[in-house]
Image (tube, helix red, strand yellow):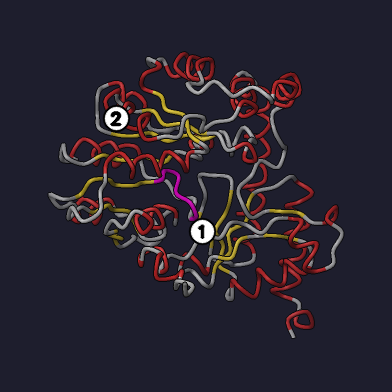
Amino acid sequence: MPHPDLQSLINPHILSLHPYEPGKPIDDVARELGLDPRTIIKLASNENPLGPSPRAIEAMQAHIHQMHIYPDGGAYHLRQALAQKHNIPPDHIVLGNGSNEIIELAFHAFTAPNQNQNVIASRYAFVVYKLMAQLFNIPFIETPDRHLHHDLSAIYNAITPHTKLIFIANPNNPTGTRIPNDQLLSFIQSLPPHVILCLDEAYYEFLEDPLPSIDLVRQGYPIIVMRTFSKIQGLAGLRIGYGVCPPAIADALQRSRQPFNTNALAQAAALAALQDENHLHRTLDNNRQGRQLLEETFKAWQLPYLPTSANFVLVKTGNGAHTFQSLLKRGIIVRSMVPYGLPEWIRVTIGTPEQNQRFLENLKELLFNTHSRS
């Protein structure tokens, strides 16, 4: 029997999909460039530079000996704690393997190929929205931006009777921009009833005056508010996030998920991290100081940048790919914006004071030292 052409067995739309490119891991950089991993700093993936909540670490250590037992598939204790925190019934909450999985579950629950459906997101929004649309073979409408900000009018005007989902990140990744509360509220209130808004709030805790989006869920608006423990709680490696939405939507998402989609250590760590206000405030203080340093420095250097509402800054360095590679050789991992269609920009996560200083010293040498650029 002749061997089949295996590629011919793959769905054509999968072959055209370019997988998500995460920030380079420290071990990869050390191996590729022959660097000591202990000397490398990673400012590429908007992780918490202070690490996980100490309470979360203690909780994981306490649960490590129970790893032979399956996790609680319904995550009862974590959902109860989130319900109490947000003053909303537990049947409004769906847990995910990171908030990324909530995005995927929305596609499972509310879209179907060959049904003349579409989904909408803004240009320069989180690239996973577009990737998921390609994965599920759903037409994706990318609306124009407004100077690297969401243009809500453009998004609204793109809605058709066949639109199923709209994705808006607030603050947005990779730009760090936010939508004013009054504009976002007006937009949500104007949406037609056949559209579900996926409001991605991965960086919600960094906002000083956030829109009370969960109040809108409580009022029954067809929205999915997505949150994560990856950023401010420092649990990115555990992949734990959640969605808050009206019960009918939550039920559809629950039916779409895998039985044990959040592991036991992640549940224990997230539950403990919710109670650690000290770690949250330390993280916010560190971010506030680091953001001020980076933005003031970029302004002094006359580098275009976007004032951020998150824990990263988008800055224009001329040749983003060159800047990225040059910093990489010096053991500093930032994020090239070439995959986002912003080849002149890099995105840098706000780190510790020492990490921020090292990044700025090296960036200054690369950009303004003639000898280093030759």
Q: Quadrant of residue 237?
A: top right
| Neighbour tally class for label 1: few under 14, some 14-19, many 20 plus, Cα within 10 Å | few
Q: Which residue is mark 2?
A: 249
x 50%, y 66%: residue: 339
Give the structural element (helix, strand or loop) at label 2: helix
x 21%, y 56%: residue: 114
Q: Which residue type carries mark 1?
A: Tyr
Q: Farthest bottom residue? A: 374
337 sits to left or right of 210: right
Instruction: Kindly tell me whether residue 212 is visible in this rendering.
Output: no
129 sits to left or right of 31: left
Is residue 359 or residue 256 the one in the foreground? 256
| Neighbour tally class for label 2: few under 14, some 14-19, many 20 plus, Cα within 10 Å | many
Is residue 135 or residue 141 the one in the foreground? 135
Magenta span contains residue 255: no
Q: List x then y, in percent, for residue 225.
A: 38, 33
Q: List x then y, in percent, for residue 344.
A: 53, 72
> Which quadrant: the C terminus?
bottom right
Magenta segment, prevailing SS (helix, strand or loop): loop
Instruction: Give the magenta-colored segment's residue range.
Output: 169-174
Looking at the image, residue 64 lies above or below residue 77: below
Instruction: Kindly tell me whether residue 123 is visible in this rendering.
Output: yes
Give the structural element (helix, strand or loop) at label 1: loop
x 58%, y 67%: residue: 303
Looking at the image, residue 53 lies above or below residue 177: above
- Label of residue 20 in the image: 1
Q: List x then y, in percent, for residue 61.
A: 76, 23
Looking at the image, residue 68 lies above or below residue 23: above
Q: List x then y, in percent, for residue 51.
A: 72, 37
Are circles 2 and 1 on residues that touch, CB within 8 Å?
no
Give whichever of discs 2 and 1 has the lower sequence position.
Answer: 1
Is residue 290 or residue 71 the one in the foreground? 71
